[in-house]
Image (tube, helix red, strand yellow):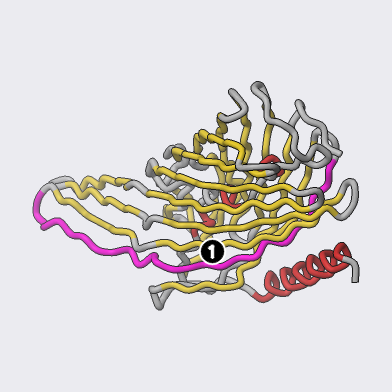
């Protein structure tokens, strides 16, 4: 069997599995999940864009030049969240690039014992700086530092049968992310391996009870992500993609400080767990515009909290990268 045919059969099998998982997985009322992909900052840093592969379609081995600019996008659809991410980028030199990630939450739905509530709006914007250097023929090392700003309303209120409920659009904290990446390009096969660490800060909410105030401080657990993605050229225009990731995150904390009456309290947020996911997809070299269509399929979910919902939906992912200074094949 030819290698290209094997890749097509593999992607086809993954898509069949993706469809069956999507139909089988449902959310149960009353359960809660610590799925980190509910924060649209995480997913787009795991899934590489077209420009993250060294060999842009039709221009393998092309040198990066100062003034290189464009726009990367990331659209993700699950049963409870639909988001889009716009990432304009600019390259100051062959080694240094600057990116701004602007998440647009088209619809976010939360389900609990008392019903469903949904909202939309701007999420938490992240600012990235990326340094890259050659690592031999057709290879490159990259270091990226990101600051996630609390631009999304983490106290967004919606009306549910006359009762105001919170559906957050952000974490309310300024978080730091660091990523190391190695990319390798061949004639017909490119791959990218990444390790990412996210350090979460605290968000605060102050409640005034008249005679005293209570300041609630939530600190989400830190995250570590390991991922690997490969794409194989099927013909002059089509690429077949396959990737995998492991997300490990730790417990957070919940602290309440009282101005009077009560003693301060502190407790753990039982968030620690491990997620494993598979990413099949296809992309097409369309000149300056390179679209990608794929999915994120949960293949393993475990939490230390026995009451956490381990059912995670398959996510459908659409990307395109627009780079007016380069031409695809």
Res 150 quadrant in image: top left
* Magenta segment main secondary structure: strand
Res 279 quadrant in image: bottom right
Residue 314 position within the rendered picture, expressed as x and y whole percent measured from the top left:
65, 65
In the rendered structure, the answer to whether residue 301 lies left or right of residue 257 reads right
In the rendered structure, the answer to whether residue 39 lies left or right of residue 209 reads right
**Is residue 311 or residue 158 the one in the foreground?**
311
Residue 65 vertical placement versus 313 (above, below): above
Residue at point 13%, 47% (across, down): 259
Residue 77 position within the rendered picture, expressed as x and y whole percent measured from the top left:
66, 55
Residue 204 position within the rendered picture, expressed as x and y whole percent measured from the top left:
30, 46
In the rendered structure, the answer to whether residue 217 lies left or right of residue 58 reads left
Q: Is residue 41 magenta?
A: no
Res 130 quadrant in image: top right
Q: Which residue is mark 1?
A: 246
In the picture, which quadrant includes the N terminus?
bottom right
In the rendered structure, which segment of residues is drawn in magenta?
Answer: 260-285
**Residue most toward the front?**
136
Residue at point 51%, 42% (across, down): 123
């Amino acid at each position: 069997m030819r290698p290209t045919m094997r890749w097509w059969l593999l992607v086809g099998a993954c898509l069949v599995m993706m469809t069956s998982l999507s139909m089988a997985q449902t959310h149960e009322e009353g359960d809660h999940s610590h799925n980190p992909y509910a924060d649209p900052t995480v997913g787009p840093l795991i899934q590489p864009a077209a420009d993250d592969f060294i060999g842009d379609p039709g221009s393998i081995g092309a040198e990066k030049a100062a003034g290189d600019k464009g726009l990367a996008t990331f659209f993700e659809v699950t049963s409870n969240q639909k988001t889009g991410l716009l990432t304009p980028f600019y390259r100051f030199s062959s080694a240094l690039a600057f990116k701004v990630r602007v998440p647009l939450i088209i619809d976010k739905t939360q389900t609990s014992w008392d019903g469903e509530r949904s909202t939309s709006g701007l999420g938490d914007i992240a600012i990235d700086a990326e340094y890259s250097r050659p690592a031999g023929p057709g290879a490159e090392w990259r270091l990226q530092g990101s600051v996630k700003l609390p631009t999304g309303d983490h106290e967004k209120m919606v009306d549910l049968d006359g009762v105001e409920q919170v559906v957050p659009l952000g974490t309310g904290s300024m978080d730091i992310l660091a990523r190391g990446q190695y990319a390798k390009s061949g004639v017909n096969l490119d791959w990218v391996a990444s390790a990412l660490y996210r350090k979460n800060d605290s968000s605060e909410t102050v409640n005034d009870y008249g005679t005293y105030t209570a300041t609630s401080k939530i600190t989400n657990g830190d995250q570590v992500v390991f991922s690997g993605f490969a794409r194989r050229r099927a013909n002059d225009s089509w690429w077949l993609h396959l990737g995998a990731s492991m997300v490990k995150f730790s417990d957070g904390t919940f602290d309440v400080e009282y101005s009077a009456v009560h003693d301060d309290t502190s407790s753990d947020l039982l968030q620690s767990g491990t997620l494993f996911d598979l990413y099949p997809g296809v992309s097409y070299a369309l000149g300056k515009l390179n679209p990608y269509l794929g999915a994120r399929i949960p293949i393993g979910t475990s939490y230390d909290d026995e009451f956490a919902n381990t059912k995670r939906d398959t996510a459908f992912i659409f990307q395109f990268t627009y780079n007016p200074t380069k031409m695809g094949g």
